[in-house]
Image: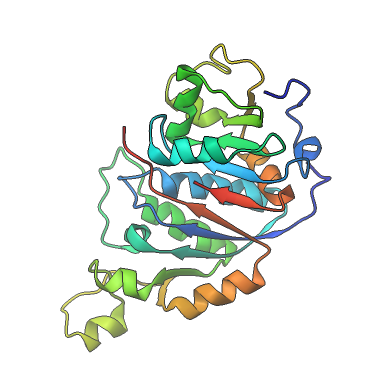
Amino acid sequence: MSESSVADGAGMASRHAVLHILNKPPGHARTHLCLATLAATDALVLIEDAVLALASGLDTSAAVYALGPDLAARGLAADNGQTGVIVIDYEELVALAAGADKTVSW
Amino acid sequence: MSAVKPVSFTLVITGAPYVSQAPQTALSFARAAVSAGHAIDRVFLYGDGVHLASSLCCAPSDEVNWHREWSDFIAQQQIPAVACIASALRRGLVDDGEARRYERDAHNVQPPFRLLGLGEWVESMTSSSRVLYFQPGGGH
C-alpha cells in the first residue's frame, strides 16, 4: 500500500501505469481477477460494492482509492482501519480517469 | 485539479437502473467531469443499460427517476445519448420508427435518447480520448 500518496487531484494524475476501476464485491470472480492483475505501479479505485473490500481487508502493493459517497452509503468509515487507502470524491475520480493512460473497468 | 488537461469521455452504461448502480455512478461522474471542464462526447447504452432510455419508467415518487435525471442532463449539456438498437429491440425498447416498422402500438424511446447501431459505437471508440464503462455490480 502506498503511504506517500496525497488526495490531490492534480498530484494523482498520470502517476499510475493502469487505472483499475472495480465495482464488484469481495469474493466475486472479477474481484479476484482484478487483484491478481494489479501491478505495484497501477492504481485501484474501489467504487460501488467494491468498497466493501475495506471491511474485509485488502492485500495489494498498488495505490488504493475508494469512492467516499459509496463508503458512506454502505456505512463504512473513511478508511475502516485499512491504512494507505485514499478516499476520493467524484471530482477526484474524474481527475484520475482524465490523467490515466489506460483504464480498466472490471 | 486544474493541472489535468481537459479530455473527452465516452461513457458506456451496461447496467440497468434499479438493478445496478451503474446509471447513478455514471451520472455523478458525468456531472463532475462537465464541472471540471471535460467534455462528454456521448453516452452509449448497451445490454441491460438500454432500460435507462425508457420514457415509460414510473419510479415511486420518493425514489429517483434515473431516466428523467439522465434525460435532463443530456438535454442540458447537449450530449448525444444512444441506445444500441440490437440491445433495445429485444428488451422492448422501441422508438417511433421502430414501433411502426414492427407494428407495435406504443413506443418508449424518444429524444434526447436515440436508437442507433454499433457504427456509432465504433465512431466513438475512434474519436473519444477516454472510454469508461459503467457495468452491473456483482450481487453479494
Q: Looking at the image, which is closer to me, A77 or A18? A: A18
Say left or right for A4 vs A97. Answer: right
Coloring applied to the structure = rainbow
Residue B20 against residue B78 in the figure, above or below: above
Give the left or right position of residue B82, taking residue B106 as reference: right
Instruction: Identify which residue, B60 or B89, lies in the foreground.
Output: B89
Q: Where residue A98 sits in the image (x, y, percent)?
A: 70, 51
* Residue beneath the point at 44% across and 19% down: A75
**Residue extending farthest right:** B3
**Is any atom of residue A23 visible in this view?**
no
- Residue B61 in which image quadrant: top left
Identify whether B96 is placed above or below B66.
below
Task: Tell me residue A15's x, y (percent).
Answer: 78, 40
Is residue A100 visible in the rendered structure shown here?
A: yes
Q: Is residue B4 left or right of residue B130?
A: right
Relative placement, left or right, of B49 versus A72 is left
Please, which residue is most extreme toward the front here? A36
In percent of the image, x 15 and y 78: which residue is there? B105
Residue B3 at x, y = what percent?
84, 45
Image coordinates of residue B4 in percent, x first then y, are 79, 48
Which corner quadrant of the image does residue A25 belong to?
top left
Q: What residue occupies the far bottom of the structure in this picture? A: B101
Residue B89 appears in which quarter of the rendering? bottom left
Image quarter in which the N terminus of chain B is found = top right
Q: Residue at 38% of width from left, 30% of height from top?
A: A27
The answer to which of A11 and A20 lies nearer the viewer is A20
- In the depicted structure, whether residue B83 falls above or below residue B20: below
Q: Measuring 57% from the left and 67% from the top, which residue is drawn there? A: B78
The quarter of the rendered structure image containing the C terminus of chain B is top left
